[in-house]
């Protein structure tokens, strides 16, 4: 089995998948990042967090970014959101150069960041009202979004009364309500338990099918990236650079039973090779220190 | 087992026990007071003469020290004349609980000594008005200034050093100045309360606003909030509960300035009543008036706490008052170096 997986042949796309990628690349570019760099002034020499990052993300594409910790994933998404400024390079949304925070680039944070003093409905109305929509229209639109994320029953609840998964659904609805061109998601499901996370991934794909939005998704979970993404951007650390861009060969619509498909496993294998290069010391050589005596039945 | 339940660190007792403990918090000091007042062999350093006997200078009702009483009686017995009789008593400045309890009613009936002086309820109302004016005026300026200082660090750097300097000047020190500028009646008293509250208020409010969650600001920015909206629709509401509780603590602070404020210029309000009653040695009225201030303060605070739970339905549990006071006493570094 392992011989099968070690081959990267399965990264080859089936004709239907290749056709999908061909059409995807014909779509207009929604988000373009052009030779973006970010240096942090440290003690002595400045630290380069991101170096020469160039990406083109097409309309309605779902792109995941993975990389080891410290590779500048978060810095990258914060720069795209306009919460941080690059030291070089530029960013274009729908072909126009932009900077600074703007509702055309909505963001979902790992820590939910819902406004605790507002009800679920009013949280979703917030961005609409900031955009100058009348409260009545905003309320109508918020209710539609609540229906889409399946939280109609909780419109008048406060965030503190919701579970983590529900909070994140509200956060997604809040970010999507003002009709952003790009939805930025910074490890949005990282704080959720495994079961809720799986539900949320499925839910996100469901929402994405219904909404014209390009999604830029940061994660450290390989399975999550493969399950969700059209393309996976692998960053490497010190300095943060694009290491490889993988076109995920798993056909859409994605289903959870694809987790064991050969395409999925091959992609996963490739990602693991990129992110955790094989360790030089085999596991057996690691010293085992037993701090308490155990019986023979313990391996 | 029982001691485990009582002494577990950080464990709140159940509701019934909580209520009992609250009651005991008041009942225990009253019990000590009752013991000292009613049990003759506890303290009671004096003797109240009931029958003077043949001691020439004793009169019924006179309070003498126990040693003096014993010495006089010893002399009388040695001389073969009638000894005096009396019962152990406490000094006049410690009235018994029932006397003070009675004074709660009778103090309102005590006629003002001089024509033109105020009855107790009028004095109390005058004091409450002074507090309300002082606190409202201080808050009208202190709240917005504090919020702006907390939200905009450059403005904090411009204003807070001098405010920090002024707040160490005791408010009563401004008394003579306030009288010279504002006259002798109500205005200087309100001014003292404003001076006493305002400078603390700006720093406390600014410190609370400074602790806002920056993640919420970022979320609002990505939703298109401009600078004014960030201040009014994110920073202020996110701090609202804390600001409300700060105001509760500051109101208590204002009450502590009342007594000094009221002796500035013409003595007035509850302080005038207390001074007047002390002068005539009606100490039960003095205690009653002091306890009344405590009751008004506690009731206002509890009323505001209750109102707060209605006003801010999103908070699951109101913060503990002790925690708030501790945080207030040990503030975080105001401006980071």
Image: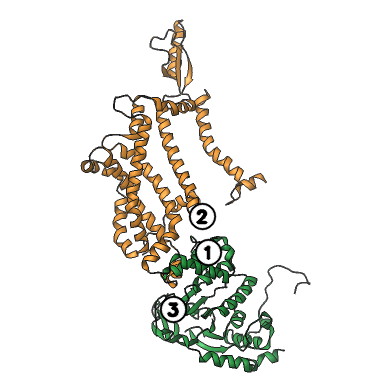
Chain colours: A green, B orange
Identify whether B303 is placed above or below A145: above
Which numbered circle lies on residue B313? 2
Could you tell me which secondary element the residue under label 2 belongs to? loop
Quadrant of the image occupied by residue B278: top left
Residue pointed to by mark 1: A120
Q: Quadrant of the C terminus of chain A?
A: bottom right
Disc 1 crowd, CA 10 A, few/some/many (<14, 14-19, 20+): many
User: Is A242 placed left or right of A205 in the picture?
Assistant: left
Identify whether A8 is placed above or below A37: below
Q: Residue at x 34, y 36 (%)?
A: B126
Quadrant of the image occupied by residue B271: top left
Residue A89, percent across and down? 40, 85
Q: Nearer the viewer, residue B213 or B335?
A: B213
Residue at the right extreme, as displayed:
A297
Identify whether A25 is placed above or below B129: below
Q: Residue at x 44, y 70 (%)?
A: B218
Which of discs 3 and 1 lies nearer the camera? The answer is: 1
- Subunit of label 2: B
Residue pointed to by mark 3: A79
Give me the C-alpha separation between circle 2 and circle 3: 36 Å
Q: Residue at x 33, y 47 (%)?
A: B196
């Amino acid at each position: 089995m392992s011989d099968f997986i070690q081959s990267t042949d399965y990264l080859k796309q089936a004709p239907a998948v290749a056709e999908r990628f061909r059409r995807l690349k014909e779509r207009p570019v929604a988000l373009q990042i052009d030779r973006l760099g970010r240096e942090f002034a440290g003690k002595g020499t400045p630290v380069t967090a991101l170096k020469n990052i160039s990406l083109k993300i097409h309309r309605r594409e779902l792109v995941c970014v993975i990389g080891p910790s410290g590779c500048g994933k978060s810095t990258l998404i914060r720069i795209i959101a306009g919460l941080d400024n690059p030291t070089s390079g530029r960013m274009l949304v729908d072909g126009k150069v932009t900077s600074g925070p703007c509702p055309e680039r909505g963001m979902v944070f790992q820590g939910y960041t819902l406004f605790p003093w507002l009800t679920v409905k009013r949280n979703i109305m917030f961005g609409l009202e900031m955009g100058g929509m009348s409260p009545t229209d905003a309320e109508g639109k918020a209710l539609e979004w609540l229906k889409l994320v399946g939280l109609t029953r909780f419109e008048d609840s406060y965030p503190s009364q919701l579970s983590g998964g529900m909070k994140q659904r509200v956060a997604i609805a809040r970010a999507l309500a003002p009709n952003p061109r790009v939805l930025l998601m910074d490890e949005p499901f990282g704080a959720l338990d495994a079961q809720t996370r799986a539900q949320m991934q499925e839910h996100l794909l469901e929402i994405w099918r219904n909404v014209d939005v390009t999604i830029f998704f940061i994660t450290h979970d390989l399975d999550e990236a493969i399950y969700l993404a059209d393309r996976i951007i692998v960053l490497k650390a010190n300095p943060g650079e694009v290491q490889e861009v993988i076109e995920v060969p798993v056909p859409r619509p994605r289903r959870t039973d694809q987790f064991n498909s050969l395409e999925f496993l091959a992609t996963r294998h490739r990602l693991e090779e990129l992110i955790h290069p094989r360790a030089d010391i085999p596991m057996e050589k690691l010293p085992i220190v037993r701090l308490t005596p155990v019986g023979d039945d313990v391996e | 087992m029982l001691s485990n339940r009582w002494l577990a660190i950080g464990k709140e007792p159940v509701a019934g026990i909580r209520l009992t403990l609250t009651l005991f918090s008041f009942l225990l000091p009253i019990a000590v007071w009752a013991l000292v007042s009613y049990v003759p062999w506890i303290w009671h350093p004096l003797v109240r003469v009931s029958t003077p006997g043949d001691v020439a200078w004793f009169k019924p009702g006179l309070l003498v020290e126990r040693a003096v009483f014993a010495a006089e009686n010893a002399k009388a017995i040695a001389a073969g004349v009638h000894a005096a009789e009396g019962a152990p008593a406490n000094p006049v400045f410690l009235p018994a609980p029932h006397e003070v309890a009675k004074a709660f009613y009778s103090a309102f009936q005590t006629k003002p000594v001089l024509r033109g002086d105020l009855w107790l309820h009028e004095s109390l109302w005058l004091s409450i008005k002074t507090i309300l004016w002082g606190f409202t005026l201080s808050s009208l300026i202190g709240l917005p200034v504090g919020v702006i200082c907390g939200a905009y660090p450059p403005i904090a750097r411009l204003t807070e050093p001098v405010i920090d300097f002024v707040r160490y000047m005791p408010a009563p020190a401004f008394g003579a100045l306030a009288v010279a500028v504002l006259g002798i009646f109500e205005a200087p008293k309100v001014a003292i309360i404003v001076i006493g509250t305002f400078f603390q208020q700006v720093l406390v409010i600014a410190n609370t606003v400074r602790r806002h969650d920056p993640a919420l600001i970022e979320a609002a920015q990505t939703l298109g909030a401009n600078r004014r909206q960030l201040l009014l629709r994110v920073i202020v509401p996110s701090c609202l509960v804390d600001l409300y509780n700060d105001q509760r603590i500051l109101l208590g602070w204002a009450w502590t300035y009342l007594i000094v404020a009221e002796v500035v210029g013409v003595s007035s309000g509850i302080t005038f009543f207390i001074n007047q009653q002390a002068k005539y040695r009606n100490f039960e009225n003095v205690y009653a008036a002091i306890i009344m201030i405590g009751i008004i303060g506690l009731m206002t605070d509890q009323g505001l706490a209750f109102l707060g739970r209605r006003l801010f339905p999103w908070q699951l549990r109101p913060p503990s008052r002790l925690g708030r006071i501790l945080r207030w006493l040990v503030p975080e570094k105001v401006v980071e170096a």
